[in-house]
Image (cartoon, grey):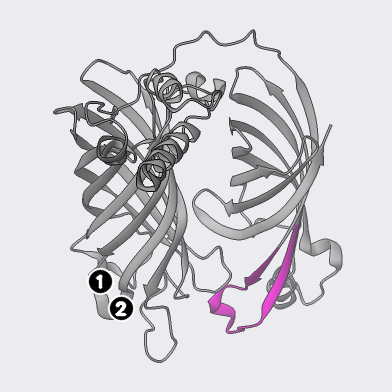
Amino acid sequence: MLTVQTSMKFSILTTIVAVLLTGSLQAQDSTDLWSKAKANPNLGRQKFIELKLHTGGHLYNGEELSNALKHGYESVELRMAWMSTGKQEWQRALNYPSYGIGFYTGNIGDATVLGNPSGIYGFFYAPFHRRKRHHFEAGLSLGFTYDLNPYDQDKNPLNDAISSKVDVYFNVGASGVWRLSELFDFVYGVDLTHFSNGRTHTPNLGLNMAGLHAGLRVHYNTIRNIVQQQIDPHYVARIRPTYIDSPLSKLKHKQEWSLYGAFGVVQADSRYGVRAFYGTASAVLDWSYLYSHVCSFGAGLDGFYDGSLGLVYGQRYGKVSTFDKMLLGAHIGHSLHLQRFDIVTQAGTYLWRRDNEKGNWFLRVALRYNVSKYGFLQIGLKTQNGAAADWIEWGGGGRL
């Protein structure tokens, strides 16, 4: 009798755990609970494992590394992704994206000069032009790469692209996804990968790698075997989501003002022969307008301070004031809103500066986390004249 009761308690407990995975615990009878749970077409969690191979060439604008980079690069990535079902409105607005974590390792050129880098990152796929067996998707990845062989004046003087063992890893691409079966997808496409330390160490031309990729996805559901072995041997949980196609709510256009402040640390250009570190600061006043459920555009003013300009102007002009290290700019921008995260991209120009040391325009790519309705934290990369890193911005702000 005790064995039977124990068995019944275990069965009820197992059923409750399965139902909790779907957030639909409403009754106490185990049979009724399971009936309600399996009525959910997305019971469990649909995921996929993706293995991709990359090959391509370097977009390098220096001279010292030309021989080390002439054979291009090859790399392999392993990614694990969570698939969205459309349960939340932003998922439906972005055509049911997927997101996850990935691992990278590769050969980017002469290993004695560049090292054998690996990396870990988070990524996001936004599908478009979706068809029954084939669709395309835009991908964005951000993380860190390590095991690089950095510049050293005596031991590694040729490496003018990388001067630190750990760099920021950034990848953007477009892929086609061909459904081979319920279990497998074939993936192919083009992408651009960027390594940079944000001028925290110099020299720092960075590495830009453009090429092709191809790979395979394997879909699975985390509770499929558990359900069949412990609850219902006849039930087969779906390994691909059934998309919820509820209409989007009526869009409420809104305007927003935000104030953002950040700091950073840089080194001056290595040609000055000074290895000291200098502080940077950014202050941004921004206006934005929500034009869709997940997107907004805007414009704003930027104030910058770069302490390393004191060294540059000291050698160039002999006399330097605090105002010489400051710049005033203006930008236009766009933001993609993903629940509590925003992907911010901005392009700007300078309204005032002492001379043309910073070039004529800049970009900002940033990831923002909205701590509350009125406050946020943000990390971003400011560039000069396009892809050349100027500094990494660490900061936060508030909005109205």
In the visual, does 40 lie left or right of 87?
left
Badge count: 2
Q: Which kind of residue does numbered mark 1 sit on?
A: Ala
Q: Which label was assigned to residue 232?
A: none
Residue under label 2? 113
Looking at the image, residue 173 lies above or below residue 37: below
The quadrant of the rendering that contains the N terminus is top left
Of badges 2 and 1, nearer the viewer stands 2
Q: Secondary structure at mark 1?
A: helix
Which is nearer the N-term, disc 2 or disc 1? 1
The answer to whether the residues at label 2 and label 1 have Cβ atoms under 8 Å apart is yes
- Note whether residue 154 is visible: yes
Look at mark 1 in the image and give the residue it sits on: 68
Amino acid type at circle 2 is Val
In front here: 40 or 297?
40
Query: Few, some or many C-alpha atoms within 10 Å of disc 2 (few <14, some 14-19, many ≥20)?
Result: many
Distance from disc 2 to disc 1, alpha carbons, whole Å, reads: 7 Å
Q: Which residues are magenta?
A: 264-281
From the viewer's perspective, tell me whether residue 211 is left or right of residue 399: left
Q: Quadrant of residue 292?
A: top right
Residue 280 on the magenta span: yes
Tell me residue 399's x, y (percent). 81, 36
Query: The C terminus appears in which quarter of the rendering?
Result: top right
Where does the image place residue 217, in percent across and percent down from the top left? 22, 40
Which residue is rendered at x = 85% and y = 69% of the image? 321
* In magenta segment, residue 393: no
Q: Is residue 143 above or below residue 62?
A: above
